[in-house]
Image (cartoon, rainbow, N blue to C red):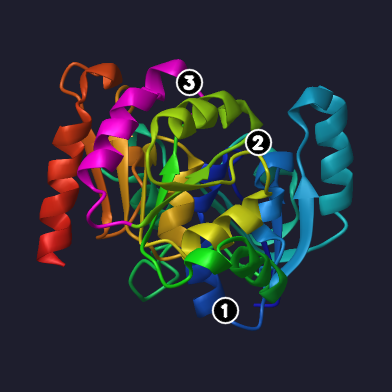
Amino acid sequence: MNKILFITLSNIGDAILTTPTLEALHLKFPKAIIDIVGDARSRILFKHCPYLGQFYEKNKQLGWLGTLSLLKKIRQTHYDLAVDLRSDGLLYFIVAHKKIFKRSNQSTLALHSVEKHFCAIKNIVNHKIPAPRIWLSDEERSEAIKIIHRYKSKNILAIGLGANSSRKIWPVPNFLELTKELKKYFDVILLLGNQQDAERSSEFIKSYSGEVIDCAGNYNLLETSALLEKSKLFVGNDSGLGHIASAVGIPSFTVFGVGEPNRYRPWGEDALWYQDPTFDISTIKGAHIAAKITQWIKLN
């Protein structure tokens, strides 16, 4: 097995949930070069993947013309194996000795997404599901050390205040209540997110009495991942940051309003979560989540 094509998903969190399947393929076929099809959002996740050949970017905005252009590039290679976890029809036109399609949603309703993706290849691999991965360089890790050098000996609580939907965003006052309750366990708050989270970060900083490192909107995804790697715990909404936390091996707690945590929560034993029974995230008290985290801290 020399050449494999792997078709991943678009959103950051969804793409990370496909990395255990990608890693399993690499473990099974360690000498194979793996080309990946993704999009502009997920591309950076695979920048330092050591077994990556080519990354092919699928641009939905270009419609069929973009798809034809993409296929023209991919069809230049004859693959030994092609695995499609996206299922938008590309696999039908790709040249490959063996093709594996994703499992349908209906047939995998009881499974987490990581398990669903892994099911597609379970007949060709013979080991347990690997952990999610994100690959970081020394440069990104060095940048993270520079940012937090004043706090390197302290316990850092990373917070993600944003998400891609207002129904998934826990109000800033609730985060403030949480951090107040957890202050005896953590010395400094690290705020992470994109530029859209800047207003929420400002609101948090104005009302928080302790030390805060505000990195929201200032660093790319890999630099943010390296910062998370230096943290003791991540707490946030249902967003890509929780999945990144799992991928860099730190515990996380995700607060859910709407959504399906049984299928889409961050993967791992230390990826905790809570969902409001009425799916209204604003009703979840900061003290309630703090109590759950405190209990976890005492057990660990």
Identify residue type, mark 3.
Ser
In the image, which is nearer the foreground, mark 1 or mark 3?
Answer: 3
The disc at residue 165 is 3
The image quadrant where one finds the N terminus is: bottom right
Identify residue type, mark 2.
Gly
On the image, the x and y values in percent for residue 253 come to 29, 46
Give the residues drawn in magenta, as a range.
162-186
Q: Which residue is nearer to you in this view: 279 or 76?
A: 279
| Residue labelled with disc 1 | 29
Which residue sits furthest bottom?
31
Mark 3 and mark 2 lie on one chain; the one further toward the N terminus is 2
User: Residue 189 vs residue 254: left or right?
Assistant: right
- How far is disc 1 from disc 3 in space, using C-alphas? 39 Å
Identify residue type, mark 1.
Phe
On the image, the x and y values in percent for residue 225 come to 56, 57
- Note whether 124 is above or below 282 in the view shown: below
- How far is disc 2 from disc 1 in space, using C-alphas? 25 Å
Mark 2 and mark 1 lie on one chain; the one further toward the N terminus is 1
The disc at residue 89 is 2
Mark 1 burial class by Cα count in 10 Å: few <14, some 14-19, many 20+: some
Q: Which residue is nearer to you in this view: 14 or 245?
A: 245
- Note whether 237 is above or below 231 in the view shown: above
Mark 1 and mark 3 lie on one chain; the one further toward the N terminus is 1
Q: Which residue is nearer to you in this view: 259 or 189?
A: 189
Mark 2 burial class by Cα count in 10 Å: few <14, some 14-19, many 20+: few
Contact (CB < 8 A) between labels 3 and 2? Answer: no
On the image, the x and y values in percent for residue 206 come to 47, 29
**Camera sees residue 118:** yes
The disc at residue 9 is none
Number of numbered tags placed on the structure image = 3
